[in-house]
Image (cartoon, helix red, strand yellow):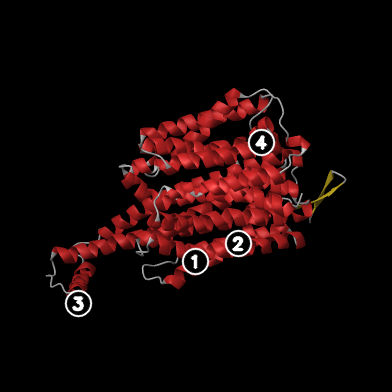
Amino acid sequence: MNKWLVAVTVMLPTIVQIIDTSIVNVSLDHIRGSLSAGIDESTWVITSYLAANAIVIPMTGWLSRLFGRKRYLIGSVFFFTLTSFLCGISWSLPALIVFRVFQGAAGGALQPLSQAILLETFPPRQHGMAMAIFGMGVMFGPIIGPLLGGWITDNWSWHWVFFINIPIGIVSILMTRSFIIDPHYVERRKMKIDYLGLSLLTVGIGCLQIMLDRGQREDWFASSFIFWLCIISFTALAVFVINELFAENPVVQFRIFRNPAFTAGNIIGFFTFFCLFGSIVLLPIYLQTLMGYTAFLAGLVLGPGGLMTMIAMPIGGKLVTKMNPKAVLGFGIAVTAFSIFMMSRFSLSADFDAIVWPRIVMGVGMGLLFIPLMTLTMSWVRKEDMGNAASIFNFTRMLGGSFGVAIASTILSRRAQYHHSHLADNMSLLDRNFQSALPQVAQTLQEQGFAPALLDPASLGTIYRGLLKQASMMAFNDTFYVLAVMMTCSIFLILIMRSHAHHAEEGVQKEIVLE
């Protein structure tokens, strides 16, 4: 079978699934207004999808063995398409949330399945290129998702955000039936179902994802809801790990962590995506809340960086075949860390160029980071274990991103409170700097057509609004700086990795350690 046809076949539904992760964000206000829901209620449309996604990802390898991989892939695409239609016709917010749960559960398997099929289809010497194809698909979704969602919502309605998945899903099912063939080791097999493991994993990951998504809004452990989610999650996951070590047919096969290279790759993946996702989420918030950018303009700022990532990924795929992948990975992490440091220098007077260039640099770094990391982590894995390994690696990457977003949001909020308190201490009529600022504000207001007195509420209000913006800006600077330092420190984790190149001859996989 032509490997490029296989690549197109598995990437098509994966891209749609990734787009659906972000496309709803820009339509949330329209959904809320149409279904008469509050702001906190409407966010469950996103949270429910992500939680269901997170639950299914680590069990993808086990489900592939239970149903047969091709059958499971077709079933996932079918139910993802069906639930997209149901989401589009939702008549109330509870109905939409329920359908989003099923949509997230159906789509969770698509990324690990695509990655495993690509790595099996392409020969070991082309694993870097295979991961470049996968990475380009992964990056294309977040780029096009917000722009496409905004355009569809403005010109049609939020219902079409879901309806556009239907024709793509139908084409994907037909291509999968025609071009995907199951090797003997991933065909359907009879085995005893680990009901206890499934239950523990569902409860543990579901509670963890909800805790990370809503923790900052609920003030973390000041909320009994978040506190009990944490207790339930970590208890369930601890018991789950113990259960899987002794289960006859474990949902997740933890024995794969006996390999130091795979373990090290997952650790590095967690911390790099922790910093990466934390910074990526902060950037549009900074643009829209402090700089006054619309959602569409914020998307234009993010777009060039995404395009640079898609350009850099094939280059990274080539480099890992020509030189030590650890060197490429280290350079990619360093470039990404430098780009986040550039973001820590943002100000309230930053122009478009000053904002877009750090994003472009980050795009290059991400392209050179993503490919060698996946290659170093996955290239040693036997084909028989590829599904389980891909599930674990994708889950670790997603978990790192979830923790990164949660922690970065918390740092931002706490530092904004700190800077607000520090700056407000000097906002007193007895403070000389404050006294000298009042005439300047009054002059600015007069130039705008107002004629306030020095102690007019308009003058004081303008100063206070400026104080709030400056405190927020300083908080963004602090958060970006912390993430840049953490990303830089993750370079040292590369020392615990081994470089591997694989060659398969007559079905026997050989490992060569690159010094």
The residue that appears at 55% across and 28% down in the rendered structure is: 200
Residue where numbered disc 3 is placed: 447
SS of the residue at dot 3?
helix
Which numbered marker is on residue 91?
none
Q: Amino acid at mark 3?
A: Glu
Name the foreground residue: 275 vs 10: 10
SS of the residue at dot 2?
helix
Q: Position of 31 compared to 244: left or right?
A: left
CA–CA distance in space, label 2 to label 1: 21 Å
For discs 2 and 3, the disc positioned in front in the rendered view = 2
The residue that appears at 59% across and 23% down in the rendered structure is: 195
Q: Earlier in the sequence, mark 2 or mark 3?
A: 2
SS of the residue at dot 1?
helix
Q: Amino acid at mark 1?
A: Met
Residue where numbered disc 4 is placed: 71
- Near mark 2 (Cα within 10 A), the count class, few <14, some 14-19 or many ≥20, is many
| Image quadrant assignment for residue 288 | bottom left
Residue where numbered disc 1 is placed: 342
Above or below, comparing residue 281 to residue 259 in the picture: below
Q: Are marks 4 and 3 in contact (CB under 8 Å)?
A: no
Residue where numbered disc 2 is placed: 310
- Near mark 1 (Cα within 10 A), the count class, few <14, some 14-19 or many ≥20, is many
Q: Amino acid at mark 2?
A: Met
Quarter of the image that includes the C terminus: bottom right
Task: Determine if residue 76 is in view.
Answer: yes
For discs 4 and 2, the disc positioned in front in the rendered view = 4
Q: Earlier in the sequence, mark 4 or mark 2?
A: 4
Percent coordinates x, y for residue 511 in the rendering: 81, 48
Q: Amino acid at mark 4?
A: Arg
Q: Earlier in the sequence, mark 1 or mark 4?
A: 4
CA–CA distance in space, label 4 to label 3: 70 Å
